[in-house]
Image (spheres, grey):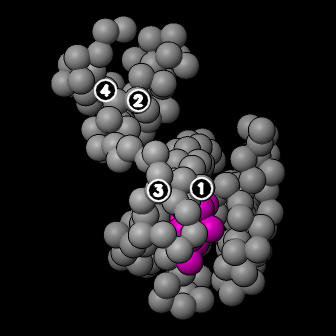
Amino acid sequence: MADRVLLVTTDEALARAAGALLAVGAELTHERDGGIGLAAAERAHPDVVVWDGELPAAEESTVARLRATGAGIVVVAGAAALAAGVQALREGAEQLVVRPVDPDHLAAAVARAAEAGRWRRAALRMTPAGSGGGSEGHRPRTLAEVEREHIERALRHHAGNRTRAARELGISRATLINKIRSYALDL
């Protein structure tokens, strides 16, 4: 299934770079206004929102509202808006892409954010509405357990190729090897 990507920007260079996502099978929707883009995200629940960090903020809780949709969030910022991009990461955006935007770099960031969005939507489905976060039959898992499973899945997907798995995970090959050792993975 193709990732549904909502691009919110007035920057034509970013829009052209995002056009490369079509080549990898993404469904791309483009909004040029922050308020309209935020409303579109809340209405359509895309897999990923690529948000131009140089847009005037719709309001202070933009990242929180985008996270509530279950979407993965990629913020694009240039030197002038880098502080706002870093703040968006602190608030929960998954990826920060710095201008000028390389289409391949953007596609990789979107892929990582889409994976994070899938995890978030799964967590939202597991949490009953109005509950305190717990549910019958739910076994809380540690971050280490989730990370280990994620690493194992990436390695299986790439038939044990550590370089490709590391690239998918957004970490260096050396970091992946250290994590394989620390989790005593037998691959």
Q: Secondary structure at mark 2?
A: helix
> Spatial distance from mark 4 to mark 2, Cα to Cα?
13 Å
Could you classify mark 2 by the number of other residues whose Cα lies within 10 Å: few (under 14), some (14-19), or many (20 or more)? few
Q: Amino acid at mark 1?
A: Arg
Q: Are marks 1 and 2 in contact (CB under 8 Å)?
A: no
Residue placed under numbered mark 3 in the picture: 135
Q: Earlier in the sequence, mark 1 or mark 2?
A: 1
What residue is rendered at 34% in x and 30% in y? Answer: 148
Q: Quadrant of residue 69?
A: bottom right
Q: Earlier in the sequence, mark 3 or mark 2?
A: 3
Residue stretch in magenta: 65-75
Look at discs 4 and 2 and give the one toward the viewer: 2
Location of residue 48 in the rendering, given as x and y in whole percent from the top left corner: 64, 57
Which numbered mark, 3 or 2, is in the foreground of this view? Answer: 3
In the image: residue 25, left or right of residue 35: right
Residue 119 within the magenta-colored segment of the rendering: no
Which quadrant holds the N terminus? top right
Around disc 3, counting alpha carbons within 10 Å, would you say few (fewer than 14), some (14 to 19), or many (20 or more)? Answer: few
Looking at marks 4 and 2 on the same chain, the residue that comes earlier in the sequence is marked by: 2
Q: Are marks 4 and 3 in contact (CB under 8 Å)?
A: no
Q: Amino acid at mark 4?
A: Leu
Q: Secondary structure at mark 3?
A: loop
Real-space Cα separation, disc 4 to disc 1, in angstroms = 30 Å
Q: Tag 2: residue type?
A: Glu
Q: Which tag, 4 or 3, sits closer to the chain's start?
A: 3
- Residue 88 lies left or right of residue 22; in this view the side is left
Q: Which residue is mark 1?
A: 125
**Location of residue 74 with respect to 109 vertically, above or below:** below
Residue drawn at (50%, 16%) of the image: 156
The circle on residue 176 is: 4
- The quadrant in which residue 30 appears is bottom right
Q: Which residue is mark 2?
A: 149
